[in-house]
Image (cartoon, rainbow, N blue to C red):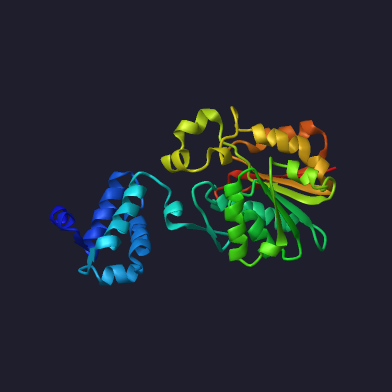
Amino acid sequence: MVTEQKATGVMTVGDLVRQGAGLLSRAGIEQAAQETAWLLEQALRMTQLELRLNESQAVEGDRLGRAQALLARRARREPLQYLLGTQEFCGLEFEVEPGVLIPRPETEGLVEAVARLASGDRPVIADIGTGSGCIAVSLTCRLPRAVLYATDCSTEALRVARRNAERHGVAANITWFEGDLLEPLRVNGLSGLVNVLVSNPPYIAERDWEALQPEVRLFEPRVALAGGEDGLAVYRRLVGNAADLLCEGGWLIMEVGQGQAEPVHRLIEAAGRYGAVEIQPDQANIDRVVCARKQ
């Protein structure tokens, strides 16, 4: 029946739901039925309730083509968030597209740590490698009197980050710099003035790259994920140079991958420029956030 309807360029909503769920299930997607519903909501401009109540409604022409194209892209393991165009983070909705890392729930721990440790009435906070801007924007919403800077080496990422700041009404509160890690802060005269440097750096080791899910390995920006041979290349640079940007008592706060908290802690100790170090677990009890205070 489905084959015959496809040949005539017409399907019902119900048949499209069933076709999509089967297609995504065969592609190895665990929540195939739910993801099909989300994609059809987007393609058909219908709520999930409307999808259920209008199973016999005909779908044809551009609407059918749009729905099947989205389902086919997801079956090729393109991330759902890129297809829907948004991802929730810290209770806010962020625009995402290819070229920016998709925000993860575990990264919310960075926002919590900064909000807890940032001191002063108007703390200066810099988000290094801002990507979609989810950390900088969430912090600005949480700490409206803070002075926020955000850096990224990608023009495309900064364009998305700016749109997200505008989306949440905080565009005027964040200064954006394009450049490599901490360098834009240094050249703009911020050495010794930053209260908190926060970063979710690339931390995937080369040996682990091929084992990543296709959604990550094939579609998300490698520059935001790959951390060199052992996954610690960017941490070495951050730990080595951050103290020059931080004020006395300022904090360097970084997300780490599973099993990396202790190696990063050793890097911090070897630098000899930090005192207190805190390690914060995520909701799965994996050590996820490392906080180092400048001596």
Looking at the image, which is closer to me, 291 or 231?
A: 231
Residue 12, located in which quarter of the rendered image?
bottom left
Image side of residue 92 versus residue 181, left or right: left
Residue 74 percent across, percent down from the top left: 36, 49
What is the x, y in percent for residue 274? 81, 40
Q: Is residue 281 left or right of residue 14?
A: right
The N terminus sits in image quarter? bottom left
Q: Nearer the viewer, residue 8 or 55?
A: 8
Residue drawn 24% across the image and 59% down it = 16
Q: Position of residue 57 (x, y in %)?
A: 22, 69
**Residue found 56% across the figure and 39% down from its top:** 225
Indicate the position of residue 280 as horizontal and vertical percent values.
Answer: 66, 48
Quadrant containing the C terminus is top right
Q: Is residue 38 above or below residue 131?
A: below
Q: Is residue 282 in view?
A: no
Write down the quadrant of residue 140 in the picture.
bottom right
Rendered view: 21 above or below 145: above
Return the residue nearer the eye: 272 or 13.
Answer: 13
Please report the residue visible at 65 percent of the width from the left and 32 percent of the height from the top. 233
Name which residue lies at 58% across and 49% down. 157
